[in-house]
Image (tube, rainbow, N blue to C red):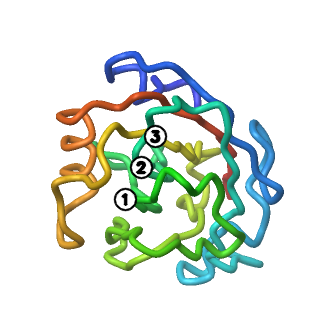
């Protein structure tokens, strides 16, 4: 499964910038705190990782932060986190995922607001959890908090993504 295509390869190319975390290592194993307590993963806390980004285009007006598992046993993967309309003056989120004023979140694929930790089915192998910060050229996406993650992605495509930053962790049980 980790050899499956990267879903971002199907989107229009965009420049990249830097995404770091003090909680997870790019290419590393998902730490217990970022695994799912709700879905009964041992040690899980459903705690969004701290994220910090730099090098994005100067004319960025907002950010979208997502966490996506393309290896989930569905035809559409699994969205773990979608936060949008994060002001361009913000270049980090703290551990726990508290959002700044004006930012919003969509329901993840479990139907809950906020970050849902990793919880691949036992025996399904390692899954990739792709954290992506997208720099947007608009202050606000033309969506509301009742929209699906797919509609958010479609609107991002429609208004145009200026650049993206990635950090990927894996986890299997």
Q: How many marks?
A: 3
The answer to which of 115 and 18 lies nearer the viewer is 18
- What SS does tag 3 mark? strand
Disc 2/disc 3 C-alpha distance (Å): 8 Å
Q: Which mark is residue 85?
A: 1
Q: Earlier in the sequence, mark 2 or mark 3?
A: 2
In the image, is 15 to the left or to the right of 62? right
Residue drawn at 23 percent across, 49 percent down: 150
Q: Is residue 17 left or right of residue 74?
A: right
- What's the CA distance linking mark 3 and mark 1? 11 Å
- Residue found 16% across the figure and 54% down from its top: 142
Residue at 57%, 47% (x, y): give it.
131
Verify CB contact (< 8 Å) between mark 2 and mark 3: no
Crowding at dot 1, Cα within 10 Å, few <14 / some 14-19 / many 20+, comes out as many
Q: Nearer the viewer, residue 148 or 87?
A: 87
Helix, strand or loop for disc 1: strand
* Camera-side mark, 2 or 3: 2
Q: Which SS class for mark 2?
A: strand
Give how far across and how far down residue 61 sits, in percent: 40, 45
The answer to whether mark 1 and mark 2 are in CB contact below 8 A is: yes
Q: Is residue 1 visible?
A: no
Hey, which quadrant is residue 32 in on the image? Answer: bottom right
Q: Which residue is mark 2?
A: 62
Residue named by callout 3: 134
Q: Position of residue 33 (x, y in %)?
A: 75, 72
Sequence-wise, the earlier of marks 1 and 2 is 2
Q: Residue at x 32, y 18 (%)?
A: 12
Q: State the quadrant of the C terminus.
A: bottom right
């Amino acid at each position: 499964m980790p050899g499956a295509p990267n879903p971002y390869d199907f989107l229009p190319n965009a420049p990249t910038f830097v995404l770091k975390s003090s909680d997870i290592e790019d290419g590393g194993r998902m730490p217990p705190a970022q695994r799912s307590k709700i879905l009964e993963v041992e040690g899980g806390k459903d705690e969004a990782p701290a994220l910090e980004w730099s090098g994005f285009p100067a004319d960025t007006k907002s950010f979208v932060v997502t966490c996506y598992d393309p290896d989930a046993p569905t035809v559409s993967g699994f969205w773990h986190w979608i936060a949008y309309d994060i002001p361009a003056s913000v270049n980090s989120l703290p551990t726990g995922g508290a959002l700044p004023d004006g930012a919003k979140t969509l329901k993840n694929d479990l139907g809950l607001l906020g970050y849902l930790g990793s919880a691949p089915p036992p025996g399904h192998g390692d899954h990739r959890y792709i954290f992506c910060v997208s720099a947007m050229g608009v202050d606000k996406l033309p969506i509301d908090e009742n929209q699906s993650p797919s509609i958010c992605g479609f609107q991002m495509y429609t208004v145009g993504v200026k650049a993206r930053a990635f950090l990927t962790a894996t986890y299997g049980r």
